[in-house]
Image: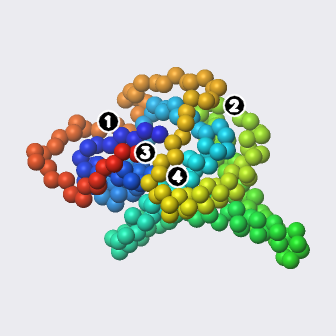
Amino acid sequence: MRAHFRRAALEDAGGWDAYNVTEDADLGFRLARLGYRSDVIAPQTMEEAPESIRPWIRQRSRWLKGYIQTLAVQLRQPSQLTALAALSLALTIGAAALSALLHGPALLLLVSLWILNLVPANLPAAGFLLIGYAASILCSAVAIRRAGLRTRWLDFARIPLYWPLQTFAAMTALVELRIRPYFWAKTEHGFTNAPEPECPSPSLSSCSSPPPPPLRFAPGRRVTNRIRQKAHG
Protein backbone atom coordinates (compact mmCIF):
# COMPACT_ATOMS: atom_id res chain seq x y z
CA MET A 1 0.00 0.00 0.00
CA ARG A 2 1.14 3.52 -0.78
CA ALA A 3 -0.34 6.60 0.82
CA HIS A 4 -0.33 10.12 -0.55
CA PHE A 5 -1.08 13.18 1.55
CA ARG A 6 -1.40 16.88 1.08
CA ARG A 7 1.40 18.48 2.99
CA ALA A 8 -0.85 20.96 4.76
CA ALA A 9 -3.08 18.15 6.05
CA LEU A 10 -0.07 16.17 7.22
CA GLU A 11 1.27 19.18 9.11
CA ASP A 12 -2.13 19.89 10.68
CA ALA A 13 -2.28 16.32 11.99
CA GLY A 14 1.10 16.68 13.71
CA GLY A 15 3.31 14.90 11.21
CA TRP A 16 4.18 11.30 10.48
CA ASP A 17 4.69 9.10 13.54
CA ALA A 18 7.72 6.98 12.67
CA TYR A 19 7.43 5.05 15.97
CA ASN A 20 4.03 3.52 15.17
CA VAL A 21 4.46 0.34 13.10
CA THR A 22 1.06 0.87 11.43
CA GLU A 23 1.56 4.59 11.01
CA ASP A 24 -1.04 4.83 8.26
CA ALA A 25 -3.80 3.68 10.64
CA ASP A 26 -2.69 6.13 13.31
CA LEU A 27 -2.47 9.02 10.87
CA GLY A 28 -5.81 8.14 9.31
CA PHE A 29 -7.61 8.55 12.63
CA ARG A 30 -5.77 11.79 13.44
CA LEU A 31 -6.73 13.21 10.04
CA ALA A 32 -10.35 12.10 10.52
CA ARG A 33 -10.51 13.90 13.87
CA LEU A 34 -9.55 17.09 12.05
CA GLY A 35 -12.34 16.61 9.49
CA TYR A 36 -10.21 15.31 6.59
CA ARG A 37 -11.37 12.50 4.34
CA SER A 38 -9.44 9.89 2.38
CA ASP A 39 -10.15 8.07 -0.87
CA VAL A 40 -8.67 5.27 -2.98
CA ILE A 41 -6.76 6.01 -6.17
CA ALA A 42 -7.22 3.89 -9.28
CA PRO A 43 -3.71 2.47 -10.00
CA GLN A 44 -2.73 -0.78 -8.30
CA THR A 45 0.37 -0.96 -6.09
CA MET A 46 1.50 -4.45 -7.23
CA GLU A 47 2.34 -5.36 -3.63
CA GLU A 48 2.55 -9.07 -2.86
CA ALA A 49 0.88 -10.90 0.00
CA PRO A 50 3.02 -13.35 2.01
CA GLU A 51 2.95 -16.84 0.51
CA SER A 52 4.02 -18.84 3.58
CA ILE A 53 3.04 -18.91 7.24
CA ARG A 54 6.15 -17.41 8.85
CA PRO A 55 6.23 -14.11 6.93
CA TRP A 56 2.43 -13.93 7.21
CA ILE A 57 2.67 -14.20 11.01
CA ARG A 58 5.37 -11.50 11.07
CA GLN A 59 3.25 -9.17 8.95
CA ARG A 60 0.05 -9.72 10.93
CA SER A 61 1.84 -9.37 14.29
CA ARG A 62 3.23 -6.02 13.14
CA TRP A 63 -0.22 -4.87 12.07
CA LEU A 64 -1.82 -5.93 15.34
CA LYS A 65 0.97 -4.36 17.39
CA GLY A 66 0.43 -1.13 15.50
CA TYR A 67 -3.32 -1.29 16.06
CA ILE A 68 -2.75 -1.55 19.81
CA GLN A 69 -0.29 1.35 19.64
CA THR A 70 -2.85 3.40 17.73
CA LEU A 71 -5.55 2.62 20.29
CA ALA A 72 -3.25 3.73 23.09
CA VAL A 73 -2.48 7.01 21.32
CA GLN A 74 -6.09 7.77 20.40
CA LEU A 75 -7.35 7.01 23.92
CA ARG A 76 -4.92 9.31 25.70
CA GLN A 77 -7.66 11.94 25.81
CA PRO A 78 -10.90 9.98 25.38
CA SER A 79 -13.04 13.00 26.29
CA GLN A 80 -12.00 14.60 23.00
CA LEU A 81 -13.48 11.73 20.99
CA THR A 82 -16.99 12.14 19.67
CA ALA A 83 -19.38 9.22 19.98
CA LEU A 84 -19.04 8.48 16.26
CA ALA A 85 -15.24 8.61 16.43
CA ALA A 86 -15.17 6.27 19.43
CA LEU A 87 -17.51 3.84 17.65
CA SER A 88 -15.37 3.93 14.51
CA LEU A 89 -12.23 3.29 16.53
CA ALA A 90 -13.86 0.37 18.37
CA LEU A 91 -15.33 -1.28 15.26
CA THR A 92 -12.16 -1.09 13.18
CA ILE A 93 -8.80 -1.53 14.85
CA GLY A 94 -10.31 -2.27 18.28
CA ALA A 95 -12.44 -5.14 16.98
CA ALA A 96 -9.58 -6.41 14.80
CA ALA A 97 -7.19 -6.65 17.75
CA LEU A 98 -9.79 -8.10 20.12
CA SER A 99 -11.09 -10.74 17.70
CA ALA A 100 -7.55 -11.84 16.88
CA LEU A 101 -6.77 -12.28 20.57
CA LEU A 102 -9.98 -14.10 21.51
CA HIS A 103 -10.87 -16.26 18.52
CA GLY A 104 -8.28 -18.99 19.04
CA PRO A 105 -8.85 -19.48 22.80
CA ALA A 106 -12.63 -19.26 22.42
CA LEU A 107 -12.64 -21.82 19.60
CA LEU A 108 -10.36 -24.16 21.55
CA LEU A 109 -12.55 -23.88 24.65
CA LEU A 110 -15.76 -24.47 22.71
CA VAL A 111 -14.43 -27.57 20.90
CA SER A 112 -12.94 -28.97 24.13
CA LEU A 113 -16.24 -28.61 25.99
CA TRP A 114 -18.08 -30.37 23.18
CA ILE A 115 -15.55 -33.22 22.97
CA LEU A 116 -15.55 -33.75 26.74
CA ASN A 117 -19.37 -33.58 26.70
CA LEU A 118 -19.30 -30.96 29.45
CA VAL A 119 -21.56 -28.68 27.43
CA PRO A 120 -24.10 -29.92 24.88
CA ALA A 121 -23.58 -28.89 21.29
CA ASN A 122 -25.16 -25.50 20.78
CA LEU A 123 -26.48 -25.21 17.25
CA PRO A 124 -27.05 -21.41 17.39
CA ALA A 125 -23.45 -20.89 18.55
CA ALA A 126 -22.11 -23.18 15.84
CA GLY A 127 -24.31 -21.47 13.27
CA PHE A 128 -23.03 -18.05 14.35
CA LEU A 129 -19.44 -19.28 13.94
CA LEU A 130 -20.18 -20.71 10.50
CA ILE A 131 -21.85 -17.47 9.43
CA GLY A 132 -18.67 -15.62 10.35
CA TYR A 133 -16.56 -17.99 8.26
CA ALA A 134 -19.04 -17.75 5.39
CA ALA A 135 -18.83 -13.95 5.48
CA SER A 136 -15.03 -14.16 5.24
CA ILE A 137 -15.29 -16.55 2.30
CA LEU A 138 -17.78 -14.29 0.54
CA CYS A 139 -15.61 -11.19 1.00
CA SER A 140 -12.58 -13.11 -0.30
CA ALA A 141 -14.50 -14.34 -3.33
CA VAL A 142 -15.63 -10.82 -4.21
CA ALA A 143 -12.09 -9.44 -3.80
CA ILE A 144 -10.61 -12.19 -5.97
CA ARG A 145 -13.17 -11.59 -8.69
CA ARG A 146 -12.61 -7.83 -8.66
CA ALA A 147 -8.86 -8.38 -8.94
CA GLY A 148 -9.39 -10.58 -12.01
CA LEU A 149 -7.74 -13.61 -10.38
CA ARG A 150 -8.69 -17.27 -10.59
CA THR A 151 -10.89 -18.66 -7.82
CA ARG A 152 -9.41 -21.66 -6.00
CA TRP A 153 -11.81 -23.49 -3.71
CA LEU A 154 -8.91 -24.89 -1.70
CA ASP A 155 -8.10 -21.34 -0.57
CA PHE A 156 -11.67 -20.86 0.61
CA ALA A 157 -11.59 -24.18 2.49
CA ARG A 158 -8.50 -23.03 4.41
CA ILE A 159 -10.03 -19.73 5.55
CA PRO A 160 -11.13 -21.18 8.97
CA LEU A 161 -7.41 -21.68 9.71
CA TYR A 162 -6.83 -17.96 9.23
CA TRP A 163 -8.37 -16.90 12.54
CA PRO A 164 -6.49 -19.26 14.88
CA LEU A 165 -3.29 -18.08 13.18
CA GLN A 166 -4.41 -14.52 13.86
CA THR A 167 -4.44 -15.38 17.57
CA PHE A 168 -0.83 -16.56 17.37
CA ALA A 169 0.07 -13.31 15.61
CA ALA A 170 -1.77 -11.31 18.26
CA MET A 171 0.13 -13.04 21.08
CA THR A 172 3.38 -12.30 19.25
CA ALA A 173 2.30 -8.67 18.97
CA LEU A 174 1.71 -8.42 22.72
CA VAL A 175 5.14 -9.84 23.48
CA GLU A 176 6.83 -7.51 21.01
CA LEU A 177 4.88 -4.56 22.37
CA ARG A 178 6.58 -5.22 25.70
CA ILE A 179 10.14 -6.04 24.62
CA ARG A 180 10.57 -4.19 21.27
CA PRO A 181 7.57 -1.95 20.52
CA TYR A 182 9.22 -0.12 17.60
CA PHE A 183 10.56 -3.20 15.80
CA TRP A 184 9.41 -3.24 12.18
CA ALA A 185 9.05 -6.78 10.78
CA LYS A 186 9.74 -6.26 7.10
CA THR A 187 7.65 -8.12 4.53
CA GLU A 188 9.87 -9.52 1.79
CA HIS A 189 8.68 -9.37 -1.80
CA GLY A 190 9.67 -10.82 -5.13
CA PHE A 191 8.78 -14.47 -4.48
CA THR A 192 5.47 -14.83 -6.30
CA ASN A 193 5.29 -16.65 -9.63
CA ALA A 194 2.22 -14.72 -10.73
CA PRO A 195 2.80 -12.34 -13.67
CA GLU A 196 2.64 -8.67 -12.83
CA PRO A 197 -0.47 -7.01 -14.27
CA GLU A 198 -0.08 -3.88 -16.28
CA CYS A 199 -0.07 -0.79 -14.10
CA PRO A 200 -2.38 1.85 -15.63
CA SER A 201 -1.46 5.48 -15.47
CA PRO A 202 -3.76 7.69 -13.41
CA SER A 203 -6.37 9.50 -15.45
CA LEU A 204 -9.26 11.75 -14.63
CA SER A 205 -11.72 9.22 -16.03
CA SER A 206 -10.46 6.38 -13.82
CA CYS A 207 -10.17 8.28 -10.56
CA SER A 208 -12.93 7.83 -8.01
CA SER A 209 -12.82 11.48 -7.01
CA PRO A 210 -12.09 14.76 -8.80
CA PRO A 211 -8.48 16.00 -8.77
CA PRO A 212 -7.59 18.14 -5.75
CA PRO A 213 -6.89 21.83 -6.15
CA PRO A 214 -3.23 22.91 -6.26
CA LEU A 215 -1.57 23.24 -2.88
CA ARG A 216 -1.04 26.73 -1.52
CA PHE A 217 0.85 27.40 1.67
CA ALA A 218 0.92 30.58 3.67
CA PRO A 219 4.48 31.81 4.33
CA GLY A 220 5.78 31.06 7.80
CA ARG A 221 3.06 28.52 8.60
CA ARG A 222 3.52 27.26 12.16
CA VAL A 223 3.47 23.50 12.65
CA THR A 224 1.89 22.33 15.91
CA ASN A 225 2.32 19.03 17.69
CA ARG A 226 5.03 17.86 15.33
CA ILE A 227 6.11 14.32 16.07
CA ARG A 228 9.81 13.55 16.11
CA GLN A 229 10.87 11.53 13.09
CA LYS A 230 12.94 8.39 13.16
CA ALA A 231 13.78 6.00 10.34
CA HIS A 232 12.49 2.47 10.60
CA GLY A 233 15.04 -0.15 11.50
Residue 150's disc is 2
Query: What's the residue type where badge 1 is placed?
Result: Pro
Mark 4 or mark 3, which is nearer the start of the sequence?
4
Q: Residues within 10 Å of mark 2 (few under 14, many from 20)?
A: few
Q: Quadrant of residue 71?
A: bottom left
SS for callout 3:
loop
Q: Is residue 112 above or below residue 229?
A: below
**Residue where numbered disc 3 is placed:** 233
Rounded to the nearest angstrom, the CA distance separating label 2 from label 3 is 37 Å
**Residue where numbered disc 4 is placed:** 63
Kindly identify the residue that appears in the image at 43 percent across and 45 percent down. Answer: 233
Rounded to the nearest angstrom, the CA distance separating label 1 from label 2 is 33 Å
Query: What's the residue type where badge 3 is placed?
Result: Gly
Task: Mark 2 vs mark 3: give the one in front.
Answer: 3
Kindly identify the residue that appears in the image at 12 percent across and 45 percent down. Answer: 218
In the image, 182: left or right of 157? left
Residue 211's disc is 1
Query: What's the residue type where badge 4 is placed?
Result: Trp
